[in-house]
Image: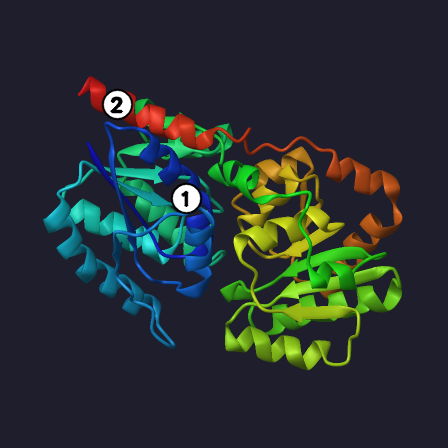
């Protein structure tokens, strides 16, 4: 059978590369890899780490690209790929515009769709935007749902999806951590942090740009002012709007180090060495708990409520005082910190990719 995996951003690559590695182990499966090019350098770093080469790259990335441009370019580019390859199954991941456009293209070509990380929901189309729409739209046309958790399965069932097509697998990002985290890892930035409690900061979410992001950065500035033992490492997103706000607010803050985006190997090891994480990202909410790191989520909603329920995550929103208050609890209250860092990770055991490929093989053998 022939399977095409299609993705275009670094977060997708981190979670899809373990699946691709597993697909390529199976001699009865012909695996093709298609990149949309929604991201470029950051995505290639992940591909290199996992020693995976793309068979196709649509190279859609353009300066100041819009969501409409991304979607239309992918649809046009995949017409050629599908006509040439005639795949038996297309695998997409999560909730990016690449995933939405790839799934739509597969649907137009009447190719079955497997959705890795299906069933995540906030039920708020504006948060996160446009990801909530993307994942719901993909799940409308999906044929095989690979839900990372029981809650994700429940949400799919509540929407009327066929239970026989839903499989709980765990999250493939936990598989990726097996490859990336190393006790021997060293870095000049981590040397700069020696003797300090490291807060790893990520902030780039589209709906946070503007006043919410200003509040986030002002909160971080207050935290380092109040706690001499804290240093903040911020791998800053390439979005010029994000950089403008960060440069203005963090100017002169000697214990906040802004660095260029890290590749996945570096980032996972930075997470492993950090004390806690402040983020508005999605995937980090799954990765950090696997490493025993408390996560404060600077958003008003999360499509990963399992982590909140388990106690590994806490939603703090973008209010400056709330971020400071919850961070200070973790810095000063040992019991609060231990409770979060020792909570059980709800996102799997590192064998999700094997389960996904086993399920695919079983389904196609039964056809």
Q: Is residue 288 visible?
A: yes
Residue depicted at x 39% and y 64%: 40
Residue depicted at x 52% and y 65%: 207
Q: Is residue 120 left or right of residue 337?
A: left
Q: Position of residue 160 (x, y in %)?
A: 33, 31
Q: Is residue 125 visible?
A: no
Q: Residues within 10 Å of mark 1 (few under 14, many from 20)?
A: many
Q: Is residue 81 left or right of residue 238?
A: left
Disc number placed over residue 115 in the picture, else none: none
For the residues labelled 2 and 1, the Cα–Cα distance comes to: 22 Å
| Residue underneath mark 2 | 363
| Residue underneath mark 1 | 17
Nearest the viewer among 17 and 298 is 17
Q: Quadrant of residue 147?
A: top left
Mark 2 and mark 1 lie on one chain; the one further toward the N terminus is: 1
Q: Is residue 340 left or right of residue 131?
A: right
Quadrant location, the N terminus: top left
Q: Position of residue 246 (x, y in %)?
A: 64, 75
Quadrant location, the C terminus: top left
Q: Position of residue 27 (x, y in %)?
A: 26, 28
Task: Decide: is 353 above or below 6.
Answer: above
Q: Are marks 2 and 1 in contact (CB under 8 Å)?
A: no
> Could you say whether the residue bearing mark 1 is in a helix, strand or loop?
helix
Q: Residues within 10 Å of mark 2 (few under 14, many from 20)?
A: few
Outermost residue, left side: 83
Q: Position of residue 263 (x, y in %)?
A: 53, 57
Q: Is residue 312 left or right of residue 37?
A: right
Nearest the viewer among 152 and 159 is 152
């Amino acid at each position: 059978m022939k399977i095409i995996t299609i993705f275009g951003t670094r977060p997708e690559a981190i979670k899809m590369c373990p699946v691709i590695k597993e697909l390529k182990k199976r001699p009865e499966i012909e695996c093709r890899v298609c990149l949309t090019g929604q991201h470029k350098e950051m995505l290639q770093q992940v591909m290199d780490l996992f020693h995976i080469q793309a068979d196709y790259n649509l190279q859609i990335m353009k300066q100041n690209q819009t969501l409409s441009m991304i979607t239309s370019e992918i649809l046009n580019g995949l017409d050629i790929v599908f006509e040439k390859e005639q795949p038996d199954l297309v695998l997409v991941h999560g909730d990016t515009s690449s995933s939405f456009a790839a799934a739509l293209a597969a649907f137009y070509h009447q190719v079955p769709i497997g959705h890795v990380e299906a069933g995540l929901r906030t039920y708020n189309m504006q948060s996160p935007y446009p990801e909530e729409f993307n994942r719901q739209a993909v799940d409308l046309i999906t044929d095989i749902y690979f839900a990372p958790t029981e809650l994700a399965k429940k949400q799919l069932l509540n929407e009327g999806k066929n239970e026989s097509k839903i499989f709980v697998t765990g999250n493939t990002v936990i598989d990726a951590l097996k490859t990336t985290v190393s006790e021997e890892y060293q870095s000049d930035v981590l040397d700069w942090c020696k003797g300090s409690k490291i807060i790893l900061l990520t902030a780039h979410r589209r709906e946070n740009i503007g006043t919410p992001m200003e509040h986030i950065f002002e909160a971080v500035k207050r935290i380092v002012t109040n706690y001499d033992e804290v240093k903040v490492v911020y791998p800053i997103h390439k979005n010029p709007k994000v950089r403008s706000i960060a440069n203005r607010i963090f100017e002169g803050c000697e214990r906040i180090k802004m660095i260029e985006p890290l590749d996945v190997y570096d980032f996972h090891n930075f997470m492993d060495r950090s004390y806690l994480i402040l983020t508005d990202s999605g995937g980090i909410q799954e990765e950090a708990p696997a490493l025993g790191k408390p996560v404060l989520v600077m958003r008003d909603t999360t499509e990963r409520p399992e982590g909140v329920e388990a106690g590994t995550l806490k939603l703090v929103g973008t209010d400056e005082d709330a971020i400071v208050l919850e961070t200070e609890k973790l810095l000063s209250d040992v019991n609060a910190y231990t409770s979060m860092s020792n909570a059980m990770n709800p996102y799997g055991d590192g064998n999700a990719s094997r389960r996904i490929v086993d399920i695919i093989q079983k389904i196609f053998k039964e056809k």
